[in-house]
Image: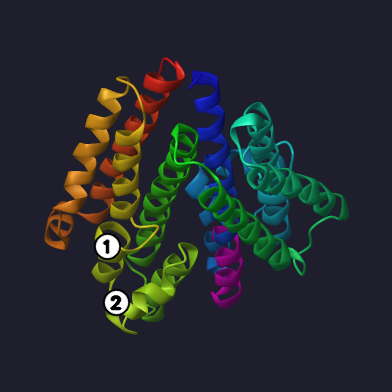
Amino acid sequence: MLSRAASSLFWMARYLERAENQARLLDVSLTMALIDVPEDREEQLSVPLLVNGSLDIFMELYGEITPLNLITFLLIDDRFQGSVYNLFRNARDNALHVRGNLSSDVWEGINLSWLEFKELRLKGVTESSASQVFDWTRERSHVFRGAAYGTMLRNDTFHFLRLGTFIERADTTARVLDIRQQLALQPGDERASRPFFEWTALLHSLAAFEAYQTTYGHNIEPMNVAELLILNADLPRSLHGCLQEIASLLEQIEGQRGRRAKRLATSLFANLRYGDRHYIEEHGLHEYLADFLTRIQRIADQIQKDYMGWQI
């Protein structure tokens, strides 16, 4: 496969996964801002900005963190490259580059998503209509993954597409877990309900609330949440689940390239596969996640260097 095609497939999937993750994060943050005390609402609204590293850009453009400003910035502002509008546009542009590699269902799904979102943007998004846009974004992401899984050959086209999805998903899970756990464990906060709401928001942000209840029951314990999102192999958005897929997909790519990327991915997967909650507790959750984020970025960079000709 040509390196340009591999890059387009990889980033097309990353952009679509990022759009869904951003919609989930924003949806939960807006809900949390409504139920939190007034002095903490800005902190709740800032979570999506902290996760994607766009707080400075936002403040430069808007100056004040309000629900409507946040919705506009993260969903439809074409000045911000990470807005859902730009993510769908970039995904569609990359899909166009590899149109011949995609099934008709996948191409039509991505193209339709872009056309529909342009219409949504023209109508504008308000605080009252934002939830419908969040639902629509999640739905279009599910349609893309379902079409890809159900209609594409299991060749390198499929492998690079899925790699993009799981690299992005692993990165997001680690970032959201790190930000939310820091909010939940803030020193000096005497409100007994604060940790409960933060951990609940975290689970909803990663579509893992029902999975937590099935596995651990209704009591929300911090290390149970961490164990589920890091070490549980059966959870689709866990770090373990993502690295298992990444290591497997790299092994299936044809040719001799990518040995270093495979080695890095296999090493990180082994740490997760044979890790336990006691190791995470001993090292500290924040420190563990910071190390993970450094390593997953190194894997992503190496994939691009080995297969796409990018010199990182």
Q: Quadrant of residue 143?
A: bottom right
Relative to 37, is 94 above or below?
A: above
Q: Residue type at mark 1: give it.
A: Asn
Is 26 covered by the magenta stretch?
yes
Q: Secondary structure at mark 1?
A: loop
Camera-nearest residue between 312 and 127: 312
Q: Quadrant of residue 214?
A: bottom left
**Res 261 label:** none
Residue 48: percent from the left, percent from the top? 54, 53
Residue 43: percent from the left, percent from the top? 52, 60
* Residue at (51% x, 56% y) in the render: 47
Residue 63: percent from the left, percent from the top? 68, 46
Camera-nearest residue between 142 and 55: 142
Q: Which residue is mark 1?
A: 232
Question: Looking at the image, which residue sits at the far bottom?
Answer: 218
Q: Which is more N-terminal, label 2 or label 1?
A: 2
Residues rendered magenta in the picture: 25-38
Relative to 156, is 238 above or below?
A: below
Relative to 165, is 173 above or below?
A: below
Q: Secondary structure at mark 2?
A: helix
Q: Which residue is mark 2?
A: 215
Question: Looking at the image, which residue sits at the far right?
Answer: 123
Q: For the residue carrying disc 1, how many other residues have a C-alpha within 10 Å: few (<14), some (14-19), or many (20+)?
A: some
On-image quarter of the C terminus? top left
Is 133 covered by the magenta stretch?
no
Is residue 156 visible from the viewing direction of this image?
A: yes
Camera-nearest residue between 297 and 200: 297
- Magenta stretch: helix, strand or loop mostly: helix
